[in-house]
Image (cartoon, grey):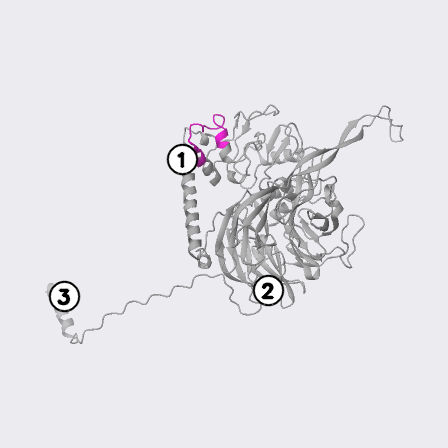
Amino acid sequence: MRAAAPTALALLVLACTPAPRDPAPPPSPPVAAKAPPPPTCARRAAGPAPAPLDATHAGSGVALADLGGRTLAFVADEDDAALHTVDIDARAALARTPLAGRPAQVIVLGDGRVVASLRDRALLEVLEPVGPAAPLERRCLVPVASEPVGLAMTPDRATLLVASRWGHALTSLATADLRRTGELPLARDPSAVVASSDGRRAFVSHAVGGRISVVTLDEGGAPTGARELSTDGVEQRARISMSKPAAPFPRSSSGPSRKVPFQTRRPTVNVDRRGSQGFALARAASGAVFAPIALVDPGPTTGAGGYGSALVQTAIEHIAVVDAMGDHADVPPISAHLGLRGCRLPRAAAFEPGDEVLLVTCLGHDQVIAYDARAEIPGKPPRTGSVRDRELFRARVGAGPTAVAVDGARRRAVVFSRFDGALTILPAARAPGPTAISAIGKELTGELPVIALPRASRLDEQRAEGQRLFHAAGGRRIAFDGRACASCHPDGRDDALTWSTPEGPRQTPMLMGRLDGTAPYGWEGGKKDLESHFARTMSRLAGAGLTAKERDAIFAYLRGMEPPAEAAVLTAEERAALVAAPAGAAEAATAETATAAAGARVALAARGEELFHAREAGCSSCHVGDELTTDGARHDVRSATRFETERSFETPSLRFVGRSAPYYHDGRYPTLLALVEGVDGSMGHTAHLSAGDRRALAAYLESL
């Protein structure tokens, strides 16, 4: 009985089913969902657009623009990961625009769009003002080489140039749609960039290495080749000897007579100095390019010298000038300097064309110095041998001045002080109007207008204090001669210099990412913890010293540093705004070639990794662990010279080793390939490797 139930139910269903009608038409094919429009970088708003005020079309941490007679400043605030819009005339902050990363520079394109270089994300963010008091709207994101910092446009405003520091490249993009038109590898740490007045060249400064790259641009603004100019210079130093007088000085009321040594001046000697701190460029109306730098004396290759010597001013201020054609860099011999008042950490520069005034921000001194630039252009009348004679005035600003922009029409400058998060407005002219200049120090007197930015985020108190202390220059707490920590470790990295020490020549190590897990410290591995190594360094520099709290603040600041991303990891929203596909057959072919080259590099590095960990090479027996830091031991790799007191050296960390040339404790190898080929038997075994395998090993090290 139970088995018949399903059959009865089926018959009931059939009986209740209506008779079939005409066959139904076949179903229509599904309607394809409309694909979202591809991301575009084009301007959308219809009204008036901000007009850039910088006649040289160079980027900065501050970009000025005119909108309906109002002067707006767009401020790249790296510590707030935001772009601020400020009305300079009303002295009021109008809007804050959160960004997808930490901006290094900002530039206003010819049609009013605003581009920010996001140094931590390997991206450019293109935005558009939609109202003076409203946050900017994102138009697109553009991938570029790692750590984009410097921005500039060609004079026709058709090409945007991007200098990427970690990725050591110059990239060109068409401003109309931000498609990539070219990319050229450069020497390490490119920083600022400016295009020549005829658009045929780009000048690129390098944060370390004492060089300026002169890059040839084709008719479309793409970089095709580069040559390097040195910013090394010469100091004409008076030779001083110590001797004793034949007879004692007369007795004084304060004590008995005594023989006191006195100084005898002899003819001057020329001392070679290395260019350093190449963070800034400014182009004059004549086409000449100014490069504020520091000239460093690392000391002799034998015996103690620059690292801790109390006999010389180790780092002094200077300005190199490149002629308009980029044929040579003019670094006149320097015969006098400003001592503790010198600008050791120049970070930004701008040119006022009317009076030909060069403005330079001095990090660590919290000052902006105005220089007479008329006598600095090659081919004009002879120049004096010191920047102190060309100084017009200096102005005190907020802590951490990292950017300056000039409003030429109104003869004023706007300075961004990153540590304080504030703008300062100051005159940009030879005669700064009603503001007086003190007879001593040439400082502007009176208060200057200051605009505080409404930050939504900032460094915590300890890291902020460490940031200030790390860049503190001009005092004697860190070093006897006014050097800052950042003088040798710009941005927590290295200065690419080898310094003279009592033990022998020693290359500056990178600090970022290498504080933890790399003990013991120092090339000789003599200190087991950071605190004792820091104390030793302060003693070497003959500084007055810091408190334990201040020392820990510097450690906290350094530990908070992270290496720039090689490529951005994007959210879904960011992927929708990413403009990555090239436009046109020529660009597609270029992209395909670049992709193939990148794939070849990856394959080469993979082969190098196999060799590194192979028993025959022996590399991983000392550089241990997943991060290849150190085995904590000292080894005699037969690298010491006869001038060195130590024969054994601690195994260094290999974190980011590809970004810290030159190599070895004394910097004898300019490249990793030269090191791999030169250390067989003393540090691993490489002689048995083929030339291709040695290149693979070097490629792997460069990828770390």
Question: Can residue 642 be found in the magenta stretch?
Answer: no
Percent position (x, y) of residue 526?
Answer: 58, 29
Real-space CA distance between mark 3 and mark 2, rounded to the nearest whole angstrom = 79 Å
Magenta range is 675-696
Name the N-terminal-most of marks 3 and 1.
Answer: 3
Percent position (x, y) of residue 554?
Answer: 61, 43
Relative vertical location of residue 628 with respect to residue 286 in this rendering, above or below:
above
Question: Can residue 677 be found in the magenta stretch?
Answer: yes
Name the N-terminal-most of marks 2 and 1.
Answer: 2
Real-space CA distance between mark 2 and mark 1, rounded to the nearest whole angstrom = 55 Å
Q: Nearer the viewer, residue 476 or 673?
A: 673
The amino acid marked with disc number 3 is Pro
Tell me, yes or no, whether the two marked residues, 3 and 1, touch with CB atoms within 8 Å. Answer: no
Relative vertical location of residue 636 with respect to residue 154 in this rendering, above or below:
above
From the image, state whether disc 3 or disc 2 is nearer to you.
2
Percent position (x, y) of residue 498?
Answer: 60, 34
Classify 10 Å Cα crowding around label 3: few (below 14), some (14-19), many (20 and above).
Answer: few
The amino acid marked with disc number 1 is Glu
Q: Quadrant of residue 152?
A: bottom right
Classify 10 Å Cα crowding around label 1: few (below 14), some (14-19), many (20 and above).
Answer: some
Real-space CA distance between mark 3 and mark 1, rounded to the nearest whole angstrom = 69 Å
Name the N-terminal-most of marks 3 and 2.
Answer: 3
Q: Secondary structure beneath disc 3?
A: helix
Classify 10 Å Cα crowding around label 2: few (below 14), some (14-19), many (20 and above).
Answer: many
Q: Secondary structure beneath disc 1?
A: helix
Q: Is residue 77 left or right of residue 442?
A: left
Question: Which mark is drawn over residue 610?
Answer: 1
Q: Mark 2 points at which residue?
A: 50
Question: Which mark is drawn over residue 6?
Answer: 3
